[in-house]
Amino acid sequence: MPSALLDQITEGPLPGASATPRRWFPFPAGQTKSPFMRATKPVNLALQGGGAHGAFTWGVLDRLLDEPRIEIGAISGTSAGAMNAVVLASGHQKGGRDGARAALENFWRAVSRDGRMSPMQRGLMDRLLGNWSLDNNPWFLAFNVATNFVSPYDYNPFNINPLREVLEREVDFDAFRKNRSIKIFLSATNVHTGKVRVFPTKEITADVVMASACLPFLFKAVEIDGTPYWDGGYVGNPPLFPFFRTGDDGDILLVQTNPVIREETPQSARDILNRINEITFNASLASEFRAIGFVNRMMGHRLMRRLTGKSIAELRLHRIEAGQKLLELTSSSKFNVDWSFFQHLRDIGREATEEFLKRHYRAIGRRSTLDLRKEGG
């Protein structure tokens, strides 16, 4: 992806950027040993947002941390993905893989515990029927309508966000910013310019995480150094380019919570809006897919090999998604904080990761398992 194009869509210098351009592939210059030959294979994780559906990502991370053949080098995250990334890295800093797994479980338990007093809960019939949505909750329906007419600057003037309190209890940000074992990149949308800003580990605070998860209809924009930011999902869900510029070793593994394809045509106002949001939140990702596909084709071109005098590895991408199991959930389930729901999504995430490892582990370090021509459009 040319630097001029990146400058148009990103704010400020890219994380890891230097005066000397880095190679557009994830292996350091001079590396001769293939990751395929190592005891552990390095991967860089890209975590999408999705509200409560982020518990699916928790399940994916829990299984990956339980897999000795996989080593996590860096994580890019947005919204709920940003929270998962920060909590994982904080736990890993304190207690390695086991510490990271414990930190993730503690975080999602705390989110559920703090949400028990919310009036937005499933009714008795929904619980009996196994319906995870809040479509029948009168408080949710009223709030959903109100947010179309009333600004959070009016109904939430003190900008109260219980998630911030949970996050600050679970993560010591002063210690986190000194973390060197796992690189973290979080994205947020500059309200004034519409560009994405990516915050590296050393710049991440509770404000940065809340900015990455700031839905403008629910919360006031989060100001960082005098600049207001909204949810990073609008322009980078999640951003992949930080991995290219830093030259991090390892394939990119995308954990996707927003469905790309839906077979049915939405007809209700709620379903239409939900589908628009899904398309919007996946648009930046599709754009990056197209750019990566172009770069890979250039790397494999005979002229490029002649000019460089060497064979250059492609950018390899993989994806873990829940498929039909998340497609069946309505958008209101993203606000469901039942512990049983979080456990359900965690188990789906672990199962999806187990299936991915069985089918594609051997491909990691060798080839992409994500069809970029198909996904990029």
Image: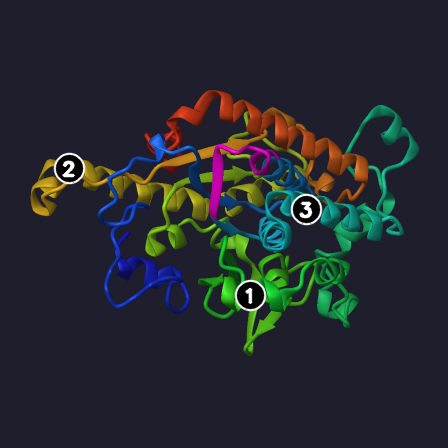
Residue at 51% x, 42% y: name it. Answer: 279
Distance between mark 2 and mark 3 Cα atoms: 43 Å
Do callouts 2 and 3 mark residues in contact (Cβ within 8 Å)?
no
Nearer to the camera, 255 or 189:
255
Disc 1 element: loop
Residue at 42% x, 49% y: name it. Answer: 240
Q: Which mark is residue 104?
A: 3
Q: Which residue is mark 1?
A: 177
Q: Residue furthest top?
A: 359
Distance between mark 2 and mark 1 Cα atoms: 41 Å
Q: Which residue is mark 2?
A: 301
Q: Amino acid at mark 2?
A: His
Q: Position of residue 61 (x, y in %)?
A: 59, 39
- Location of residue 70 with respect to 352 vertically, above or below: below
Q: Amino acid at mark 1?
A: Arg
Q: Residue furthest bottom?
A: 226
Tell me where the magenta segment starts and ends, as one range: 63-73
